[in-house]
Image (cartoon, rainbow, N blue to C red):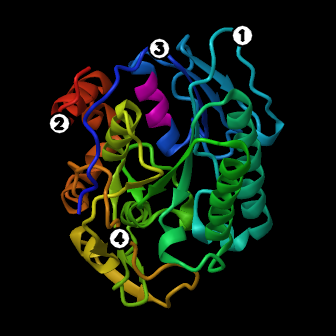
Amino acid sequence: MITTFSTESTEIEPMNFIVTGGCGFIGSHLVETLVMMGQNVLVIDDMRNGKTIFKDNPNIKYVHQDVCSVHPTIKQGKFNAIFHLANTPRIRLAIEQPLEALRNGIDPTIHVAEWARKFKCPLFYATSSSTIHSDFTSNPYTFAKTVGEDILQLYDKHYGLHYHLLYFYNVYGPREADYGEHSTVIRSFKNQILKGEPLRVFGSGRKTRDFTHIHDVIDMLVVLLKAEKKPRNVHLGTGNPYSIREIAEAFNHPIVHEFDKPGEAHDTLCEEPYAPCDFDVIGYIKHWKEEFDESKTFRRVQQQLEEIDTKFGIDS
């Protein structure tokens, strides 16, 4: 089922955005797109997992500090929206480092909610599909994301905070970070192939995941920004899940099975995608090596924006 959304849109005049985690995987793509749309972006990233890709762009200001130590100010105009994308990146890593995962997931969200209250601007919070498909105590990552949602609900109730929950579903594609054994399924399989190792599938491989390409995620976020009416819950997935076994077999590489790891949901399905997606993960896998040369696979953002307007019938 595809969520019905309004194609009535507003042309986005030059605005000012805050993006936490703006040097990370999803954040860097979002920042790049916002700048190509003529927007100004304050990027806050402590650089534990990110890279500064656009160093000399006058529309981007970088603050390489922890979110909790930053007090954003603006000399002219106002902040129009905040995207809070910074967090501990992986469930498995959170299980091994619970204190850090809880601090990184909860404390910054309180600070960002305060910024949004102070600047009276909407907050887009990167939560996780795990909060829907798992018990909130299943792991520290899901717990922190759930508490983050509760914090925003509290600020809405008492301070009228305007916020939107962004549910991401196993995002993959160019610039995906390598966290070694804590990497995503697709990144892990890539690493194992490059090392000449068999693909390690935990358990039977019957767990299913909704895999979403980063370009589709950014397309949906642009549509969201341009829409007059924005839903509270925004599901950024395809609605077309695959089992881990199917993903492994698509790589056409030897597979070994290992004991399953606890703490993760058995299935994650995006039941109400915010908008249609172009990429299918199986098709992507067949050409995955090309993405190591990003110049060959990177869609020019300006062309991408024009495609979005045409695809969704948006008048720019």
The residue closer to the viewer here, 226 or 281, is 226
Label 4 sits on residue? 269
Q: Is residue 31 magenta?
A: yes
The residue tagged 3 is: 14
Residue bearing the label numbered 1: 75
Q: Quadrant of the N terminus?
A: bottom left
Question: How far across and how far down the image is residue 290, in percent?
Answer: 26, 45
In the rendered structure, the answer to whether residue 211 lies left or right of residue 68 reads: left
Cα separation, mark 3 vs mark 4, equals 36 Å
> Label 2 sits on what residue type?
Lys
Question: Are circles 1 and 4 on residues that touch, CB within 8 Å?
Answer: no
Marks 3 and 4, the one that precedes in the sequence: 3
Q: Is residue 26 left or right of residue 163?
A: left
Mark 2, other Cα within 10 Å: few <14 / some 14–19 / many ≥20? few
Is residue 49 shown in magenta?
A: no
Image: 312 above or below 254: above
Dot placed on the residue nearer the N-terminal end, 3 or 2: 3
Q: Circle 2 sits on which residue?
A: 311
